[in-house]
Image: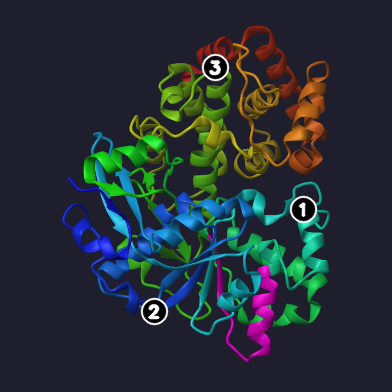
Amino acid sequence: MENLKLNNSNLSKISERVLVPNYNRLDIKTGIVHVGIGGFHRAHQAYYTDLLLQNNKNKDWGICGVALLDFDTKIYNTLKEQDGLYTLIIKELDGTHTKQVIGSIVEYLFAPEDPVKVIEKMAHPDVKIITLTITEGGYNYNEATRGFDFGNTLIKHDLEFPNNPKTIYGYLTQALKLRKERGLKGCTIQSCDNIQENGHMIKNMLLSYVKKAQPSLTNWIIENVSFPNAMVDRITPATSSEDITSLKNTSGILDAWPVVCEPFKQWVIEDNFAQGRPDWGNVGAQFVTDVVPYEKMKLSLLNAGHSVIGILGALLGYQTIDQAVHNKNISTFLHLYMNVEVTPILGNLEGLDLDLYKKTLLERFGNKNIKDQIERICSESSAKFPIFILPTVKAQLKNNGSVDLAAFIVAAWAIYSLGKDENGVPLVIKDANKLLLDVKATAAVTNPEAFLELETIFGELKNSTKFKEAYIKAYNNITNNGVEQCLREINSNSLSHI
């Protein structure tokens, strides 16, 4: 079988092997600028958009993918060389792989190379939606002050050099300024990140920045730009070299960066768009008036569940999520955490079978074909814990409920942050706050509550006697007895909750 490089000129030959776009990509107009063209965007929003284009609908909604950071050089160069095309590999539960080439990204820009070009694209009259997957840490939110972090050196740069921005806020401000000056309509800015009320978050953070950077623009944004909330879900592990080789060996496709994902997908969107939207509802998305209950459920169960499995699994020496979740002590603890501490705070989820959702989560985590790396799941935990786990703690404290299990997870994270698993094997910790985590984790060895002094993460939680006592007890138990023994005892003492 001839090996074919993935690009426009080879699509007709590749179509004999896997599904490829059945539409003329040259006919597609760019209506969406997406910032952060990593694996999740390409498995989720770009996939939904491709489904619409396959149905010969929404030709005004092609995507321009923007690589925002210097770190994104590789993905930009890959898409540029492949004409924006990539292979999506859906790893089914039965081990089979469903493959198709996605063509909805019809333009691609590298922001560090030409910031003005990105600003102009965001301000283009054809562009009606700007979407974001910039990770939880990209929103520049300070948990301690509950506001925008103006201490960020990149933010300081953008305030001083507004025409050469480095952050999403600098780019959005300049683009919206141009739209206003040119008498254009506003647009929709839609977060696709794992943050509760993510639309409200990006709106509040952007307006905080604009009030300082370009105060005269504030009212125009409020009146002309919409920020819908959305809940997104599809497990998308990092692409491995084995995935690239397997695609070449089985289909003869030379794709430098295919995307792998699970079959499950979900997208719940608040129907609040300033200038119209694609008909994503026709291909499985759900438009609702209030996304918050769905967001809260997903962040508190799936995303928190990932962090629970990741931190505990890392300490026990596991490499992938499926390995860790097949440890009965870990899966039982997660089930217990979801039932005892998360479920009571979720409220009414009309039309959704919560017990079935939780059961399905454990099955998804256990998909042996996904091989989601624990290192990926544990990366940037300092941005994830305040969003995925600590809101549950605060709600339970307010309701005088249990926080023992969440405290155990935080204690495990503190020990994980020392950088070694229980066998003394070094852990690769990828976190923007790595140096500070290291300092506080080291101090916690002799004074466990020192870890809670990470104010931008824990805020005033360190002042809660109930949580602090549960955390210190858990920290000492893990230190003295190890994770496995602690989990065994917790699960044994709480079987009545399962």
Query: Callout 1: helix, strand or loop?
Result: loop
| Residue 183 within the segment the image draws in magenta | yes
Crowd class of label 2 (few under 14; some 14 to 19; many from 20; radius 10 Å): some
Q: Residue at x 83, y 19 (%)?
A: 447
Q: Is residue 339 shown above or below 66?
A: above
Crowd class of label 3 (few under 14; some 14 to 19; many from 20; radius 10 Å): some
Which amino acid type corresponds to the residue marked 1 in the rendered image? Arg
Closer to the N terminus: mark 2 or mark 3? 2
Counting labels gives: 3
Which amino acid type corresponds to the residue marked 3 in the rendered image? Leu
| Residue 265 within the segment the image draws in magenta | no
Closer to the N terminus: mark 1 or mark 3? 1
Q: CA distance from mark 2 to mark 3?
A: 50 Å
Q: Is residue 141 shown above or below 412?
A: below
Q: Which residue is mark 3?
A: 316
Which amino acid type corresponds to the residue marked 2 in the rendered image? Asp
Query: Callout 2: helix, strand or loop?
Result: loop
Q: CA distance from mark 1 to mark 3?
A: 34 Å
137 displayed left or right of 266: right
Q: Residue at x 46, y 50 (%)?
A: 39
Evaluate if marks 2 and 3 touch, with contact meaning CB atoms under 8 Å apart: no
Q: Which residue is mark 2?
A: 60
Where's residue 20, x and y in %?
A: 25, 60
Tell me which corner region of the image, top left, top right, bottom left or bottom right, holds residue 180: bottom right
Q: CA distance from mark 2 to mark 1?
A: 38 Å
228 displayed left or right of 259: right
Q: Which residue is mark 1?
A: 146
Q: What span is in magenta?
A: 171-191
